[in-house]
Structure formats: C-alpha cells, structure tokens
Amino acid sequence: MRLLLVNDDGIDAVGIQALAKEFEKDYELVIVAPEGQRSAASHSITLTKPILVKRVEIPGIKSKAYSVSGSPADCVRVALDKLVEGPIDMVLSGINFGLNIGADVLYSGTVSAAIEGNLYKIPSMAFSCEIGKGTECFETAAKYAKKIFEQVKEDLVKNNIVLNVNFPCIKEEEIKGIKVCKIGGIVYDYYFVENRNGEDEITLALEGRHREEKEEDSDRFYLKEGYITITPLHYDLTNYNLMQKVQEWLEI
C-alpha cells in the first residue's frame, strides 16, 4: 500500500516522524507537511498567495518528504494534485501534539487534513496523542497506530469515512484497550483580556477549555480511563431528517 502522511504541527514535529519511522518499515510513504506549526487551522486552504513546496530530508527517515507553506488541507491537495504519481491508498494525519476530542475536531488541522483526503474518496485516519513529557508517548502511539491500521485497512478502503484516533499519554503496559465511541463536548470559549488600549480597543487571548461535558460513553471519558479511542467521522453535512420540515416552512 502507498500512504500519504500529513499533519498540522509541521514537517519537523516529533509526531509525524514517529509515525513515519513505524510505517515505512512495511509501506511506501510520501510525507507532505506544513513548513511550520499550523495547529487549529481547521479546513482552511490558501487562496490569495502562491504555495511554496520544498523537498526536505528528515534525519532517520528514508521516505520522500516535502514541506508546504500552506495549511494541512493544502498539503493533501498539493500532494494528490502535484507531488504524487499514481494512486494513494490511504491518508494518515498526525500524530498530533495534543488530543483531538470532542469539539476539537471542528478546529483541528490534523482531522481536517484527513477529511481533505476523504473528499478525494481516499480513506483516512487522524492520530492524536495526549501531551506529556518527552517522546515516549509518541513512540507508543505510533506502534498502536500501526496495529490499528493493520486491523482496519481492508475494511476502511471499502468505506468513505475518517477514523479519528486518540492516544492517552501513559506507559504502553498501562493502556487498557481500545474503545470505539462518540465524541464528547469540549468548547474553547474563554478569552481573557491581555491589554486594553483606550476605550475602543482590547487585545484578547484564548485561555482554553472553559466548559466541558463529561459523558461516560465519550472519547474524553475513556481516554481518562486509560483507553485508546476511535470515532468514525462522516462528513455529509446535510440533515436529511429536517429536509421535509424545512420544505414545509417555505412556500415553494
């Protein structure tokens, strides 16, 4: 199989390198990642300026690698449209520095890169790891990412979905197992005032998660319990259940 590796933390991030080292043992890889940090870029693409693409060498990794001066979604588009000759069997995004659970998936460049692959009718997986100390958690996450990939790859190529996978940052022997579950609710909605410039201008910074939902069958709950979580994501945004009702609202 030929795999496209992308992320939102940048070409030099430890997560994508851990993933590449694990997967290139058995698969052909092409690595295309932002030139720098692009976390929370969501599904943005570059429209108003040219994108710079550079061939790069990553120490310890033999696979072809490119940096892109755009967003994570740009990386997928550039790879599939210009850099890769022949088909890509799957897009792997990550391993992200930090979890992408709950409402994070709406803002995540990691998840959005996987979705972009999915828009090209390519099955995709997004991997994210809880932030810890050192690189050990990413090495463990990469091992489990490959194990999960090996189990789902045959079925995943038959289905046009994204699997969002999150890893707790704990020792390998402490991982209790894998839970397929729904996403919970986490909202970034708390800003604090950094500076006030007179009466008409203030500077705001995002403090972080202010409001959390702790549902016992959600990704957030199981990660705290020491499980790896997997959530299948589907991106047909049409609410078919409400189509008839909205039709009734309108005189057409």
Image: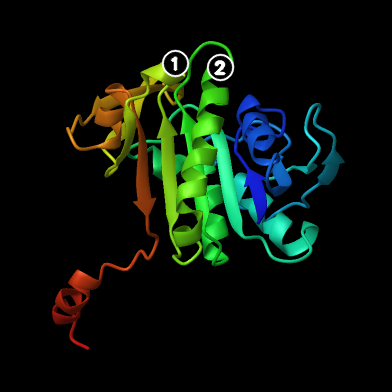
Q: Residue at x 35, y 64 (%)?
A: 237
Sequence-wise first label, 2 or 1 = 2
Rendering quarter of residue 72: top right
**Residue 238 % position (x, y):** 32, 68
The outermost residue toward the bottom is 252
Q: Residue furthest top?
A: 133
Q: Three-letter amino acid code at disc 1?
A: Lys
Q: Which mark is residue 171?
A: 1
- The answer to which image quadrant residue 36 occupies is top right
| Residue 74 higher or lower than 208, as above or below | below
Residue that label 2 marks: 136
Q: Are marks 2 and 1 in contact (CB under 8 Å)?
A: yes
Residue 223 left/right relative to 44: left
Please state the horizontal and vertical placement of residue 24, each as a whole percent of the image: 70, 41
Q: Is residue 23 left or right of residue 149?
A: right
Q: What crowding class fits label 2: few (fewer than 14 Cα within 10 Å), some (14-19), or many (20 or more)?
A: some
